[in-house]
Amino acid sequence: MSEIISQIFGNTYWFLSYLLPFLLVLTPVVFFHELGHFAVARWNGVKVDVFAVGFGKELIGRTDSHGTRWKFCAIPLGGYVKFAGDANAASSPDFEQDKLMSEEEKAGSFMHKSVGQRAAVVIAGPLANFILAIVIFTAGFMIWGKPVSDPIIASVQEESAAMDAGLKAGDLIVSLNGTKIGSFNDIPLIVAPNAGREMTIIVERAGIERSFQITPREKEIEDRFGNKQKIGLIGITNTREVGNFRIEKMGIIDAFGEAVTQTWYQIKIPLLYLKDIIIGKKSAEMLGGPIKIAKYSGDIASQGYASLIQFIAFISVAIGLMNLFPIPMLDGGHLMFYAIEAIRGRPLSEKAQEMGFTVGLVAIFSLMIFTTYNDVFR
């Protein structure tokens, strides 16, 4: 009996600590992504058959006056919008059904819209993710503020990139790689993804600006939850006293500008990492999947709802960016097909498109298996 109680308690703890926060993070991100597709499709006269959050068996749903079935499904890992004329949830064209369509049905069919209209519908999903992130970041800077500290070096670590470059305690960092530094907290955003890349840092020392070349070094760090990641570091510290640490709440204009900058960094960092993987500078061991997201969701949820809401913004950017990769079945793959169609003046053949979607399916499943393997063995 005690074993059964222990197992129930353990499963309940796991659900409340990790699975529930994971669903709270993923569901709104997926909903807004699909809402982007849905809204632009409606504006362009496309009939939407299904709007689903999750996959598999429908748990709850309703059909609206336009004939769209809105539903939540049993497997809450993703979602989709199925347009009239689609063969499946990935918006693959249903060529057999197309031959049987009336002219009225073709008018509402996604595949019969212009290249520009189809591209607009497809790109609207990732754009909705970026917009969601900007809205969350903006609200966060207005409501909770931004941690700020003066970009003054309190100490330089021995045998670090900063020491080798000639930086000293007391230096005021003016800019880093051409980006003006307003707070010490801005520095990691620039340094972390640039391990091994030489950068220009300008500091003010004794009232005079000096320029130095510095190359961040890659090191593995571990947070208080045991999560490990490899990032670039230069070896400088800042303290509450030296940096005059404070929380600054912003007005809507400043908050929006800061939110756009934050969103751009969240796009730029993974792109730099992907570039390093492709050219062989870094391994793909840090790529993560659903298990990693669930782990981080639980860890961050333990810090409070404000942190979890901010994490939703980070995941929204990540999902929006991932969907733009030129892999058939993803939004980026569809955009690639439309670009080819625009150049050729006609779409690819049925066989070529079917082959592309098959390759895309294999690529996505391979990536899921690889990232899950990374998550489990990390």
Image (cartoon, rainbow, N blue to C red):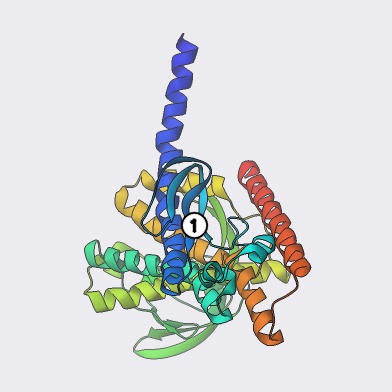
- Residue 311 in which image quadrant: bottom left
Disc 1 marks which residue? 49
Regarding residue 152, the answer to whether it shows in the image is no
User: Could you say which is closer to the camera, residue 103 or residue 291?
Assistant: 103
As drawn, is 198 to the left or to the right of 183? right
The residue lying toward the viewer, choosing from 204 and 323, is: 323
| Residue depicted at x 73% and y 72% | 279
The local crowd at label 1, few if under 14, some if 14 to 19, many if 20 or more residues have their Cα within 10 Å, is some
- Coordinates of residue 325 in the picture (x, y in percent): 61, 68
Residue 165 image point, x, y percent:
55, 78
| Residue 26 picture location, percent across and down | 45, 51
Residue drawn at 72 percent across, 67 percent down: 353
User: Which residue extends farthest top?
Assistant: 1
The x, y position of residue 9, in whole percent, is 42, 23
In the rendered view, tell whether residue 201 sits above or below residue 272. below
Q: Quadrant of the C terminus?
A: top right
Q: Is residue 262 above or below residue 72?
A: below
Q: Residue at x 60, y 59 (%)?
A: 90
Assign a secondary structure to mark 1. strand
Q: Residue at x 61, y 46 (%)?
A: 375
Q: Nearer the viewer, residue 127 or 340?
A: 340
Task: In the rendered view, tell whether residue 114 sits above or below residue 76.
Answer: below
Q: Is residue 308 left or right of residue 321?
A: left
- The kind of residue tagged 1 is Asp
> Going by the image, does 60 lie left or right of 252?
right
Give the quarter of the image for residue 146: bottom left
Q: Residue furthest bottom?
A: 208
